[in-house]
């Protein structure tokens, strides 16, 4: 991607944003518009056709904690913002350890989780395997919107009719006798989600507690139709400074000590 001139400012604070979320894109867009930072956005490289990003982008893993710490030093990063998805637990753990070992200030940008409201029929689960178990032994018609790494857990329950939604095709196909695949990328409107649930006579939704607006439509639609949601709790996060919104992350950046500018660190 071409670097806008403000992204190359000599002496401008150098920021690395760990992305893969709408918040990371929005933060990068706002910082690019403001200028005064040298930005880099990092993606895991999982989706075949990632969305365009509003900042210079790198793709692929760093090689664990050591790899990320080495990258922070080599790129003279002044601040790291972990804006990965709330379920990207390994990356967040690595970010916390690498930032600590490289002496780089770290902020986690984590959207608030969804909370049940009246008429929601949620059943909690600790992880995806647990959620599949909580569907029970009797055959049900289930919508599952999961990532490619997680979807294999559904094979433990071949008695259900599965409607599996993912951004990229599930390959190889799941070893399930009754499964239909939909490829789609959010955001998903509540009215469309309601139609999808009704047309497919879905009686349970398997969801991660991702938070945010983009994928809440299925939760609101399930509530409206009286459908049970098996809600997978978020994995534990490292104890680091955390912002719940892009605005709060921008405020944190403004408070960053001046001594963290590349000129003064002498690295
Ligand atoms: P994960 O399990 O926490 O991370 C596994 C490994 O993938 C990490 O150790 C790291 O490899 C690499 N990685 C993850 N995020 C990266 C990033 N932003 N930049 C560079 N490398 C990254 O992650 P995940 O749950 O598979 O998520 C992968 C990506 O998809 C993340 O960017 C996340 O924001 C996005 N995403 C995830 C979900 C979800 O439900 N998990 C949903 C929407 C979007 P190394 O150890 O080699 O550095």
Image (tube, rainbow, N blue to C red):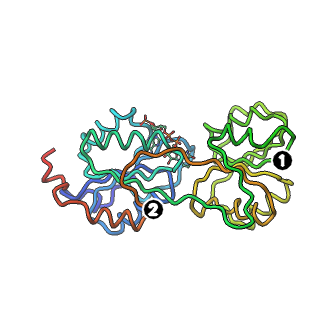
Residue 102's image quarter?
top left
In front here: 160 or 263?
A: 160
Image location of residue 164, percent across then percent down: 74, 45
Mark 1 nearby-residue class (10 Å; few <14, some 14–19, many ≥20): many
- The residue that disc 2 covers is 244
Residue carrying label 1: 141
Helix, strand or loop status at disc 1: strand
Q: Secondary structure at mark 2?
A: loop
Q: Is residue 183 visible?
A: no
Distance of label 1 from label 2 (alpha carbons): 35 Å
Q: Residue at x 50, y 54 (%)?
A: 21
Residue 212, given in percent of the width and then of the height, sits at 57, 61
Q: Is residue 68 visible?
A: yes
Question: Is 242 on the left or on the right of 231, as rendered?
Answer: left
Q: Quick one: label 2, few (<14), some, or many (20+) residues within 10 Å?
A: some
Q: Is the residue under label 2 in contact with that under label 1 (CB below 8 Å)?
A: no
Residue 45's spot in the image, x, y percent?
A: 50, 41
* Residue pictured at 39% horizontal, 48% vertical: 239
């Amino acid at each position: 991607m071409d670097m806008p001139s403000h992204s190359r400012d000599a002496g401008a604070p150098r920021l690395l944003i760990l992305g893969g979320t709408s918040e990371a894109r929005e933060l990068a867009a706002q910082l690019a518009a403001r200028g005064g930072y040298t930005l880099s956005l990092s993606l895991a490289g999982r989706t075949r056709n990632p969305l365009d990003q509003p900042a210079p982008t790198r793709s692929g893993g760093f090689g664990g904690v050591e790899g990320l710490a080495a990258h922070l030093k080599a790129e003279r990063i002044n601040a790291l913002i972990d804006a990965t998805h709330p379920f990207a637990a390994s990356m967040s753990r690595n970010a916390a350890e690498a930032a600590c070992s490289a002496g780089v200030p770290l902020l986690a940008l984590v959207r608030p989780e969804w909370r049940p409201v009246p008429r929601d029929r949620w059943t909690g689960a600790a992880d995806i395997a647990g959620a599949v178990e909580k569907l029970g032994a009797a055959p049900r018609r289930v919508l599952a919107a999961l990532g490619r790494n997680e979807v294999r857990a559904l094979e433990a329950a071949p008695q259900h009719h599965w409607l599996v939604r993912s951004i990229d095709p599930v390959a190889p196909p799941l070893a399930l006798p009754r499964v239909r695949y939909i490829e789609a990328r959010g955001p998903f409107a509540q009215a469309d989600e309601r139609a999808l649930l009704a047309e497919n006579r879905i009686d349970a939704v398997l969801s991660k507690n991702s938070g945010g607006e983009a994928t809440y439509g299925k939760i609101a639609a399930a509530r409206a139709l009286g459908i049970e949601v098996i809600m997978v709790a978020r994995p534990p996060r490292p104890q680091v400074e955390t912002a719940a919104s892009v605005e709060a992350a921008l405020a944190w950046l403004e408070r960053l000590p001046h001594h963290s500018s590349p000129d003064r660190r002498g690295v």
